[in-house]
Amino acid sequence: MTVAVVLFTSDLRLHDHPPMHAALKAADEVVPLFVLDPGIRTAHFDAPNRRAFLADCLNDLDASLRSRGGRLVVRAGPVAREVRTVAAECGAGEVHMAAGVTAYARHREERLRKELDDSDVALRVHEAVITALAPGAVTPSGSDHFAVFTPYFRRWSQVSLRQPLRAPRTVRVPDGVRGEPLPERAGVSGTSPGLPAGGETAGRDRFSRWSRSGLSRYEDRHDDLAGDATSRLSPYLHFGVLSPAELVHRSRERGGPGAEAFVRQVCWRDFHHQVMAARPSASGKDYRTRHDRWRGEDEAAEDIAAWREGRTGYPVVDAAMRQLRHEGWMHNRARLLVASFLTKTLYVDWRIGARHFLDLLVDGDIVNNQLNWQWVAGTGTDTRPHRVLNPLVQARRFDPDGAYVRRWVPELAGVDGRKVHEPWRLPAEERDALDYPEPVIDLADGLARFKHARGRD
């Protein structure tokens, strides 16, 4: 009786899962394994919202495996040690896992390969599991990766993605493999009150419902802050309970401008993964050095606190920051404008904003979070690194009636129409009754400081 181990990491699903598919072809029995890695917390990748969502994902994966005759084995400890131990306990000849691109994922794979080589166990690493297309599958002439999105999208769109794999009907797990109890969401404190349910079942249901009602309108409505018309699938993609390749295929089957606009967003995710695969240091260092003299925690403490708390005096910025705290999620357009406000208007180091997002976001992905922040800050892949998103212009365009602001900033719920975006222009007696702060900075002053700092580079 041959045995293989499937190590789950950021791919907590059974549908379209190449490592599981390969393991079931190679062996009579399979051990589906997830390791609660203490290194994740040490590396600051952990946060209450993601820990709670992960618990949902693991319980759902276990339930799916049990419905097929199997179960999820959970172990706690260093990944390489635990995988080697499980492989020895069940006599496995192979371990299958998905490839990652971060420096942490690469080091984990290197340590695991060394441990397994010493035990005479083969490690099979599968590409295009966490992404639709493997990083490095397409490259420009003279470089190891695309540094600009549009030419990458053009090449990416010409590639035929692999066909999604069906979920297995049966998974046979050998007897006697010890596992830890599964973590429970109820055991995690400090989570956002509006945190959604995690897991493959919830993710597939969300995509099915949204693709029927929202996909066709996505191109026209994805920037509508109040309309909340985005898919909200980012947490499910982050934990890998949904397959990016399957989402692309299913969206294209429906067709239309909305589907193509959504596929483009999936491609953005792949684009960032191929950048990080080529430049893993970009998780903490500037991808393109501009020699910015950013303000840090000490110099800008009050401004940073106001930004984090949603008390900047700019309603659309504050609404977005409060949505983040309540839901562990934020609309993509809102992410861009609050990041621009912090890095360009307040001139604060992008890493401070990225860290705050990782503390709260349920989809807090090192690849997409860090590279999106760098894109906005002007140190990343944006071809217009000095662009500044004016929060008033953004508010008037993407929340014209102020409904998004009134939803998240209840102090301003009684302010009519567009006036809600500029409460400082209200009569003094109305302002005094609002309990809402004055702007932390005049936009013109912030822009002048940014231009002056940019001119010194």
Image (cartoon, rainbow, N blue to C red):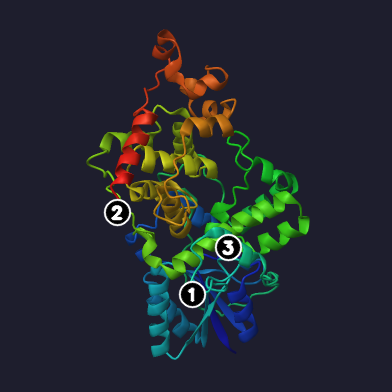
Name which residue lies at 34% across and 61% down.
43
Q: Disc 1, disc 2: CB below 8 Å? A: no
Q: What's the amino acid at mark 2?
A: His
Where is the N terminus found, in terms of image quarters? bottom right
x%, y% of residue 416? 56, 17
Specify which label sits upstream in the sequence, 3 or 1: 1
Q: Is residue 82 above or below residue 150?
A: below
Q: What's the amino acid at mark 3?
A: Pro
**Which numbered dot is residue 291?**
2
**Mark 3 residue crowding within 10 angstroms, few (<14) / some (14–19) / many (20+):** few
Name which residue lies at 44% across and 77% down.
83
Name which residue lies at 66% across and 40% down.
221
Name which residue lies at 26% across and 38% down.
301
Q: Is residue 152 above or below residue 328?
A: below
**Which numbered dot is residue 151?**
3
Residue 284 visible here: yes
Name the element at disc 1: loop
Q: Is residue 216 above or below residue 201?
A: above
* Furthest-front residue in this view: 455
Name the element at disc 2: loop
**Which numbered dot is residue 83?**
none
Foreground residue, 198 or 139?
139
